[in-house]
Amino acid sequence: MSKKTKKKKKLEEKNTIIRVENVSKFFRVPHQKIDSLRGMFVSVFSKKTYEEFVALEDISFDIKKGEFVGIIGKNGSGKSTLLKILAGVYMPDSGKVVINGRISPFLELGIGFNPELSGRDNIYLNATILGLNRREINEKFDKIVEFSEIGRFIDQKVKNYSSGMQSKLAFSVAIHANREILLMDEVLAVGDVAFQKKCLNIFENYKNQGKTVVLVSHAIDTVEKYCDKVVYLSNSKIKKIGSSKEVCDEFLRDNLTKEQLKEMKQNEGNCI
Ligand code: ADP
Ligand code: MG
């Protein structure tokens, strides 16, 4: 048995489906901004300087099979980067991620879509990447289109879709792939109220089916309602991890003024 298989077996015994171990991710941001042809010419001969930017620092946590886990934090705190590492889009610069199941990701807009292809072709492309064969895709095709509400635009190039339409189609493919783990980045921020309600129904179904879901969202009340556990990122690190109520409360206390908190309490139950 290989080392990797042994590790996965060990995790299985503990019912752990995702393990994130001391993960860090850096980005190199170039210093000079090239905004002219002359600048481009000069930059070929000059020494390039970069600034190393830490997007994630020493992140560790486990996710158990069937857990619904939220990832919250202010803009730029590293949520999408973490989800992309779980999806295998980025490699961590240090640390490791072990995943013991098949993943269906819904990531930031545009990832996975070829804008020059039609919606129809992109469904086949994406579903194939997720591991479905042609027969399976043929079977699910109508349902995917129906859920996405794309209708007659299905044969238009995806580059002509609005961002909302692209997101709906990507989300529809992700949920119909029927994998054990669903990763979702800001799905509630796209689409209209009716679509958001459909997403919440999907969360409910996934919860009942015991699937594992990792949800990045700014909709704190939804995170609190659906998630068993929440990871709160702040400045590229884990600020708090624990039960959803406890962590969401801390996040709100850190980020809202007293007046905003009071207002929120009064409106509780009115929003999605
Ligand atoms: P969030 O999703 O929490 O808003 P992100 O994970 O998208 O945050 O980004 C975390 C930080 O990493 C941000 O400061 C962002 O500018 C930076 N970042 C993300 N992706 C890249 C990239 N490809 N190149 C350089 N910097 C990046
Ligand atoms: Mg993000």
Image: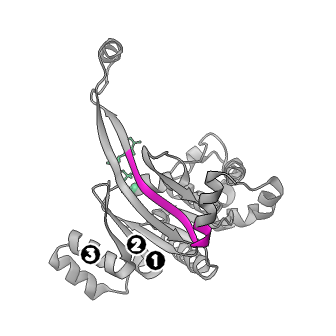
The residue range painted magenta reads 11-25
At mark 2, the secondary structure is strand
Mark 1 highlights which residue? 227
Mark positioned earlier in the residue sequence (1 or 3): 1
Q: Amino acid at mark 1?
A: Cys
Mark 3 highlights which residue? 250
Q: Position of residue 130 (x, y in %)?
A: 67, 54
The C terminus sits in image quarter: bottom left
The N terminus sits in image quarter: bottom right
Magenta segment main secondary structure: strand
| Other-residue count near label 2 (Cα within 10 Å), few / some / many at <14 / 14–19 / ≥20 | many
Mark positioned earlier in the residue sequence (2 or 3): 2
Mark 2 vs mark 1, CA separation in Å = 7 Å
Position of residue 166 relative to residue 53, above or below, is: below
Mark 2 highlights which residue? 230
Q: Is residue 23 left or right of residue 133?
A: left
At mark 1, the secondary structure is loop
Q: Position of residue 222 (x, y in %)?
A: 42, 77
Residue lying furthest left = 258
Q: Within the image, what quadrant is residue 73 found in?
A: bottom left
